[in-house]
Amino acid sequence: MRTSLLNHRHGHRTQFWRTESRRRTNFVPRRVRGAARHLFDCWPQVRDAVSSAGRIALFLDFDGTLAPFRRRPGDVKPLGPTLQKVLERLAERKRLYGYVVSGRPLQQLRELVPFRNFKLLGLHGWEGRRRPSLVKELRLLRKAKHLLEQGLSTTSRIWVEDKHLALAVHYREASARDVRRGRKVVEDILRTVEPSIHLLRGEKVWELIPRRIDGKGPAVLAVLAGLPWSTLPIFVGDSMTDESAFRVLPRGLTIHVGANRRTLARFYLRDPGEVKTFLRKLEGALHLAQ
């Protein structure tokens, strides 16, 4: 039975994982926003699920999850030695597959996560996997960048980050008036590059990105399709872009980081400090299960 399932087509393999995973945990599926529980309040159940899983696939966002959130992406520093050592020890566990999945370009991610024990997936899971080239989309993004620079020239504190395969329009520091004006500029420009380019909304950012880069949820499912069927996925993230991963993992261990409780994740942690504590507890649970 297991061998034949692993030989199924990608789509069938993924669907099998999503339905069959109910056998791996005693969690009750939950899709209602706002009902997440603090992870450490449920730690005995979580520990048992980790201990009984054949394999663990650990997916970690970067900004706001592994590293404290900063107003500008360039202000974030590489992982500190303490957290790096925790991740390195986790990566040594034969039962665990480790991934950092970020909206940052892969090259930036390599500089911020300066070790190769975890697989790095940039641009919401697109970069770092074998994916087709996006020549047409790149041409449209160059056009959009030129139009954005013109259209946003009079809006203060709104700036464009060029990610090569995406354009992130940051408005965190802008006034409400400028945000309204900036939104109209972005929406008008989007109409000139659709349908190949679509809008991905994040935390105080509008991202113009190729439609074929369809987010962390599909990327995570694609990764899981190549792993043993007994793998328990754990996804930890803090932003709106992580919700698509929470949505496609109804039987997994999904953890939202931050004060906002309106999430599809089952559990929450308050901040990156608690994420570090969780990773240490996870290391202990894997050690006890040996």
Image (spheres, rainbow, N blue to C red):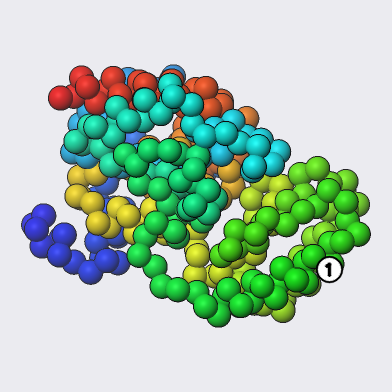
User: Considering depth in this image, is 227 or 71 the residue closer to the camera?
Assistant: 71
In the image, residue 259 above or below residue 254: above
Tell me the residue at 28%/34% (across/down): 91
Quarter holding the C terminus?
top left
- Judge whether residue 10 can be spotted in this image: yes
**How busy is the neighbourhood of tag 1: few (under 14 within 10 Å), some, or many (20 plus)?**
few
In the image, residue 139 above or below residue 14: below
Circle 1 — which element? helix
Tell me the residue at 24%/26% (across/down): 286
In the image, residue 183 lies at what x, y percent? 80, 60
In the image, residue 139 lies at what x, y percent? 61, 77
* Dot 1 amino acid type: Gln
Would you identify the image quadrant in which residue 230 lies? top left
Would you identify the image quadrant in which residue 236 lies? top left
Can you identify the residue that label 1 sits on? 150
- Judge whether residue 47 can be spotted in this image: no
User: Considering depth in this image, is 141 or 194 the residue closer to the camera?
Assistant: 141
Q: How many marks?
A: 1
In the image, residue 53 lies at what x, y percent? 22, 36
Would you identify the image quadrant in which residue 82 lies? top left
Horizontal side, residue 166 vs residue 285: left or right: right
Tell me the residue at 77%/54% (across/down): 159
Quarter holding the N terminus?
bottom left
Tell me the residue at 50%/63% (across/down): 214
Horizontal side, residue 277 vs residue 284: left or right: right
Horizontal side, residue 209 vs residue 266: left or right: right
In the image, residue 184 lies at what x, y percent? 82, 65
User: Considering depth in this image, is 41 or 192 the residue closer to the camera?
Assistant: 192
